C-alpha cells in the first residue's frame, strides 16, 4: 500500500503533505513579483490596488482565480475588502503548514472548489459568493496550473469573457497571467483594445518569462469582452491553430 501511495504521489505530482504544486498559497509579494512589469515602477501591488479602488474601500470584492487566495488577500489592509474568495480545484488549506481556514472566515474569505473552465463553477461563484454583486478585483496567477489549460484561443477567449462578466464597471481591475501559447495573440489584442477605445483600459506586457494583462473595466465598457476575429487569430497563429483546436475538445464547459 505504501508503494502505491508514493506512486500515486509521483503520478499526481504531490509531495508527502498532498501538495501538488510548488506554489500553493502565495503571498501578496509573490504576486507582486509576477505583475511588477504592469505596475508603475517601484509601486507595491497592495498600494496600487487599494489606491486605484479607493472609491470602493470597505465595500470591495476580490477573487483569485486558480488558487486559495488565503495568504494573498491577508496581505491587504484589513477591512479594505468586504469579502474575498479563492477558486481552486480543491480546498487544500488543511494540508498547509498552518491551516488558515479560521482566520479566513474572520476576514470573510472563502475558498470555492471548482474548475474555472466550467460554467458550473462560474454559476457557483455568482450564486454563492457574488450574490448579484460584481467583483472589483480579479487576479489569476496559476503558475504551473497554466500548463493544464487548453491552448485553444477561442475556447480560452470565451473563458476570459466569462471572467470579464464578473468584473464591476466601476473601474473593476483584472490582473491575469497567461499561458505562453497566447502571448502573440494577447499582444495584438492589447493593441486593438487601445486603438478601438472600447471603454476599457488595457495594459499588456511580457517580461520575457511571464505574459500579463492588466484590464480596467470602465462605466461605458462593452457587455462582451472584445476579442480578435477568426481571421485575425488565423493570421497570427497560422498552422499552429489547427493543432491547438484539438485541445478544446477536452475542455467543454458545462
Ligand atoms: C501552482 S498553484 C498556484 C496557486 C496560487 N495561485 C499561487 O500563486 O500560489 C495552481 C493552482 O491552480 C489551481 N488550478 C489549476 N487548474 C485549475 C482550474 N482549471 N480551475 C481552478 N483552479 C485550477 C489549483 O487548484 C492550484 O490551486
Image (cartoon, helix red, strand yellow):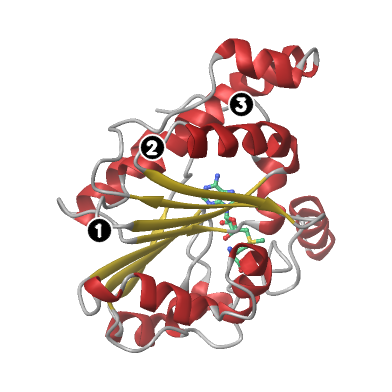
Position in image of residue 226 (x %, y %): 43, 29
**Quadrant placement of the C terminus:** top left
Residue at position x 53%, y 68% in the image: 92
* Of the image marks 2 and 1, the number of the one nearer the N terminus: 1
Which secondary structure lies at badge 3?
A: helix
Residue 129: quadrant of the picture: bottom left
| Foreground pick, 148 / 63 | 63
Q: Is residue 226 above or below residue 22?
A: above
Q: Report ligand 1 position as a quadrant.
A: bottom right
| Foreground pick, 126 / 56 | 56
Q: Dot 3: few (<14), some (14–19), or many (≥20) neighbours within 10 Å? A: many
Task: Measure how far apart labels 2 and 3 are at the Cα level.
Answer: 14 Å
Number of on-image labels: 3
Ligand 1 neighbours mark 1 (CB distance < 8 Å): no
Q: Which residue is mark 2?
A: 162
| Camera-nearest label, 2 or 1 | 2
Q: Which residue is mark 1?
A: 129
Position in image of residue 50 (x %, y %): 38, 78
Residue at position x 80%, y 56% in the image: 209
Q: Which residue is mark 3?
A: 153
Q: Are marks 2 and 1 in contact (CB under 8 Å)?
A: no
Q: Is residue 56 above or below residue 177?
A: below
Name the disc covering residue 214, or none. none
Position in image of residue 223 (x %, y %): 28, 32
| Foreground pick, 145 / 225 | 225
Amino acid at each position: 500500500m505504501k508503494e502505491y501511495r508514493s506512486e500515486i504521489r509521483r503520478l499526481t505530482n504531490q509531495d508527502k503533505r498532498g501538495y501538488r504544486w510548488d506554489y500553493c498559497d502565495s503571498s501578496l509579494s509573490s504576486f507582486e513579483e509576477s505583475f511588477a512589469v504592469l505596475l508603475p515602477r517601484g509601486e507595491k501591488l497592495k498600494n496600487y490596488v487599494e489606491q486605484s479602488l479607493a472609491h470602493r474601500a470597505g465595500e470591495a470584492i476580490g477573487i483569485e482565480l486558480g488558487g486559495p487566495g488565503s495568504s494573498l488577500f491577508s496581505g491587504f489592509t484589513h477591512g479594505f475588502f468586504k469579502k474575498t474568495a479563492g477558486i481552486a480545484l480543491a480546498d487544500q488549506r488543511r494540508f498547509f503548514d498552518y491551516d488558515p481556514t479560521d482566520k479566513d472566515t474572520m476576514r470573510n474569505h472563502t475558498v470555492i472548489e471548482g474548475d474555472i473552465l466550467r460554467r458550473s463553477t462560474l454559476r457557483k461563484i455568482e450564486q454563492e459568493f457574488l450574490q448579484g454583486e460584481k467583483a472589483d478585483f480579479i487576479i489569476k496567477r496559476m503558475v504551473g496550473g497554466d500548463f493544464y489549460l487548453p491552448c485553444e484561443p477561442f475556447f480560452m477567449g470565451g473563458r476570459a469573457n466569462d471572467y470579464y462578466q464578473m468584473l464591476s464597471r466601476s473601474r473593476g481591475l483584472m490582473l491575469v497571467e497567461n499561458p505562453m501559447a497566447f502571448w502573440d495573440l494577447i499582444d495584438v489584442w492589447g493593441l486593438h483594445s487601445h486603438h478601438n477605445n472600447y471603454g476599457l483600459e488595457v495594459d499588456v506586457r511580457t517580461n520575457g518569462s511571464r505574459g500579463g494583462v492588466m484590464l480596467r473595466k470602465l462605466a461605458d465598457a462593452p457587455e462582451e469582452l472584445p476579442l480578435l476575429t477568426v481571421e485575425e487569430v488565423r493570421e497570427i497563429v497560422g498552422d499552429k491553430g489547427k493543432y491547438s483546436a484539438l485541445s478544446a475538445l477536452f475542455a467543454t464547459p458545462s
